[in-house]
Image (cartoon, rainbow, N blue to C red):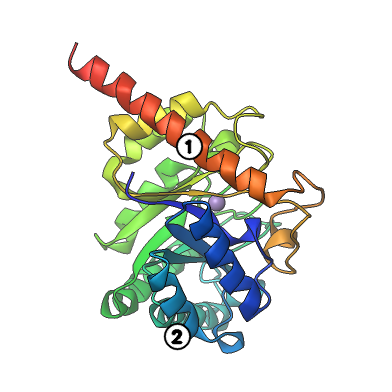
C-alpha cells in the first residue's frame, strides 16, 4: 500500500471551509496521509488554502463524485451527455486547483437507483465521455479512477469484469478501476478473485464493512480481501470509507441510503480503522511472502 487515507465524511458533511480544514487536521492527527472529499463544490471553498493546508500536513487529496440525473454521460440524450462531460471537466480542474491527485467515483453514470436497463449506445457514450475526461485529466496531472458500485447506485458498472471491459472500450491506458469492499461484497461472486483479475488496473481501493460501520464487525471477509491485494502486490492507495447519519450531507448520504447511525464517535472509529487496516495488511503480506518463499 502506498498511502492510507480516510473519507472526509467520517469528520464532516463537507459544507463549510472550516469543516474541510478540520477534516484535514483530524485525518493527520490520526496518522492518515490521504483524505477523500466528495462532491467538492469549488465555488464554495478557498481551494488554495485547502491545498496549502494539505501540503503542510503531508496529506494528499482525492475527490470523488457521481453524476446527477440531468448530466448522465451513459444516457442516450445528447444534452445530458454534454452536461455530464462539462461537469467532469470542471471537476478535474477543481481537483487540480485543490492540489489533488485523483478524481474517482461514479464518473461514468448517474449516482443512484436506475429504473431501466443500461443500453449499448449509453455504454459507448459513457466510454467516450470518460476518454475525453481522461484527456483533460492528463493535462491537469489528475488520475481518473472509476468506482465499480452496487446495483442500487448505478446500472452500468456493478462488477469488476464489467469495469475491465469498460476500460478497454475507453481506449485509454491511463484510466483505472476504483474498487470497494462494500460494493464487491454485494455484487461479486468471488471478491478476492475479482481483485486478482483486475490486478494492476486497480489504482484506488475503498475499505468498507458490509453495513458501512466498524471494520471487522460485519460480514466482509477482510482476510481474503487483503490476501488478494497482497497477491497482486498492490502498491497504490487504500482509503477507509464509512458513513453514519451522525454526519449528514444532502448529496452523498441520501444517494448512498445512509438512514441510521452506524457509529457516533468518529475519533474511535478512525483510530480503530487505521489499526485494523494496518494489521490486516501486515498479516496478508506475511502470508503472501511465506507462500512465495516456503
Ligand atoms: Mn466507495
- Tell me the residue at 56%/41% (across/down): 273
* Residue at the spot of label 1: 277
Tell me which corner region of the image, top left, top right, bottom left or bottom right, holds residue 10: bottom right
Q: Residue furthest top?
A: 294
Q: Is residue 57 above or below residue 182?
A: below
**What is the secondary structure assignment of the residue under circle 1?**
helix
Q: Is residue 65 visible?
A: no
Q: Residues within 10 Å of mark 2 (few under 14, many from 20)?
A: few
Specify the quadrant that holds the N terminus. top left
Q: Nearer the viewer, residue 112 or 257?
A: 257
Q: Residues within 10 Å of mark 1 (few under 14, many from 20)?
A: many
Q: Nearer the viewer, residue 90 or 157?
A: 90
Q: Nearer the viewer, residue 258 or 135?
A: 258
| Residue 102, image x, y percentages | 39, 66
- Tell me the residue at 51%/37% (across/down): 275
Q: Residue furthest left?
A: 293
- Asked whether the residues under the numbered discs 1 and 2 touch, taking CB atoms below 8 Å apart as contact, a structural biologist would say no
| Residue 160, image x, y percentages | 43, 42
* Residue at the spot of label 2: 48
Amino acid at each position: 500500500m502506498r498511502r492510507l487515507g480516510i473519507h472526509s465524511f467520517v469528520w464532516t458533511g463537507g459544507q463549510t471551509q472550516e469543516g474541510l480544514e478540520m477534516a484535514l487536521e483530524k485525518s493527520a492527527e490520526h496518522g492518515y496521509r490521504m483524505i477523500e472529499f466528495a462532491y467538492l463544490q469549488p465555488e464554495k471553498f478557498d481551494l488554495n488554502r485547502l491545498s496549502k493546508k494539505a501540503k503542510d500536513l503531508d496529506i494528499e487529496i482525492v475527490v470523488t463524485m457521481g453524476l446527477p440525473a440531468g448530466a448522465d454521460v451513459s444516457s442516450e440524450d445528447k444534452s445530458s451527455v454534454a452536461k455530464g462531460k462539462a461537469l467532469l471537466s470542471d471537476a478535474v480542474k477543481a481537483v487540480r486547483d485543490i492540489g489533488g491527485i485523483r478524481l474517482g467515483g461514479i464518473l461514468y453514470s448517474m449516482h443512484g437507483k436506475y429504473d431501466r436497463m443500461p443500453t449499448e449506445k449509453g455504454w459507448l457514450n459513457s466510454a467516450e465521455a470518460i476518454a475525453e475526461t481522461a484527456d483533460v485529466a492528463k493535462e491537469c496531472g489528475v488520475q481518473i479512477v472509476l468506482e465499480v458500485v452496487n446495483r442500487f447506485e448505478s446500472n452500468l458498472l456493478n462488477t469488476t469484469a464489467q469495469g475491465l471491459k469498460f476500460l478497454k472500450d475507453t481506449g485509454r491506458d491511463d484510466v483505472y478501476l476504483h474498487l470497494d469492499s462494500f460494493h464487491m461484497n454485494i455484487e461479486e461472486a468471488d471478491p478476492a478473485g475479482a481483485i486478482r483479475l483486475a490486478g494492476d488496473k486497480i489504482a484506488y481501493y475503498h475499505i468498507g464493512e458490509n453495513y458501512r460501520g466498524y471494520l471487522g464487525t460485519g460480514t466482509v471477509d477482510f482476510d481474503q480481501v487483503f490476501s488478494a491485494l497482497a497477491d497482486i502486490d498492490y502498491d497504490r492507495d487504500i482509503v477507509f470509507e464509512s458513513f453514519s447519519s451522525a454526519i449528514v450531507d444532502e448529496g452523498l448520504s441520501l444517494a448512498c441510503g445512509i438512514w441510521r447511525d452506524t457509529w457516533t464517535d468518529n475519533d474511535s472509529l478512525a483510530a480503530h480503522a487505521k489499526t485494523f487496516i494496518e494489521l490486516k495488511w501486515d498479516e496478508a503480506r506475511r502470508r503472501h511472502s511465506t507462500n512465495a518463499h516456503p
